[in-house]
């Protein structure tokens, strides 16, 4: 059975602007700007914690005896913090997308979360190889 649904257009009759007119830029509400700012701050804090986990894991490599269990745990914590930070950054861009008027701010807001996520994907892909090589190097006498 086919049912007819009533379609209501929100925001006026014009869907696309006329050829001579510029489209209106998206203007976020103050509430969504504050949510985006809060999410970006949390993402930054998580990235700083991820970097701290990396530093601690690397410093543990120089202490004898090497405890690989803690190093692997710290790498896992680093991975989780970086991924959650990237997801929060991407979510903040949905609340307050970057404007192309300010090129630097546009680049930072649109690319920072993506760059961080890609960097972590690449480094975590090789973590097993890296740990294996380090273990092999440190195991040789």
Image (spheres, helix red, strand yellow):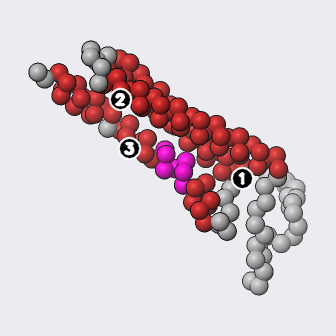
For residue 2, side relative to residue 106 (left or right): right
Task: Tell me the quarter of the picture where residue 122 sits.
Answer: top left
Q: Is residue 76 visible?
A: no
- Please tell me whether residue 104 is drawn above or below residue 122 in the rendered image: below
Dots 1, 2 in contact, CB < 8 A: no
- Please tell me whether residue 85 is drawn above or below residue 69 in the rendered image: below
- Residue designated by label 1: 96
Query: Going 36% across and 26% down the picture, which residue do you hit?
Result: 59
Q: Nearer the viewer, residue 118 or 67?
A: 67
Query: Going 75% across and 43% down the picture, which residue do you hit?
Result: 35
Give SS at disc 3: helix
Main secondary structure of the magenta stretch: helix
Compare marks 2 and 3 and give the one earlier in the sequence: 2
Q: Is residue 14 visible?
A: yes
- Residue designated by label 3: 122
Residue 108 location, x and y as percent? 58, 55
CA–CA distance in space, label 3 to label 1: 28 Å
Write down the region rendered in magenta.
111-117
Q: Which mark is residue 58?
A: 2
For residue 137, side relative to residue 34 (left or right): left
For residue 92, side relative to residue 4 (left or right): left
Query: Going 33% across and 34% down the picture, which residue do you hit?
Result: 127
**Among all residues in the image, which is located at the extreme left?**
141
Task: Tell me the quarter of the picture where residue 14 sits.
Answer: bottom right
């Amino acid at each position: 059975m086919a049912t007819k649904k009533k379609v209501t257009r929100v925001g006026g009759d014009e869907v696309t602007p006329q050829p001579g007119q510029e489209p209106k830029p998206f203007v976020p509400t103050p509430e969504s700007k504050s949510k985006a700012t809060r999410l970006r701050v949390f993402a930054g804090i998580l990235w700083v914690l991820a970097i701290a986990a990396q530093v601690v894991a690397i410093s543990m490599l120089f202490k004898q005896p090497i405890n690989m269990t803690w190093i692997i745990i710290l790498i896992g914590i680093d991975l989780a913090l970086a991924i959650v930070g990237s997801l929060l950054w991407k979510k903040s861009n949905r609340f307050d997308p970057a404007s192309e008027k300010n090129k630097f701010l546009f680049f930072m807001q649109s690319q920072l979360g993506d760059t961080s996520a890609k960097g972590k994907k690449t480094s975590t892909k090789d973590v097993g190889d890296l740990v294996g090589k380090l273990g092999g190097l440190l195991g040789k006498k």
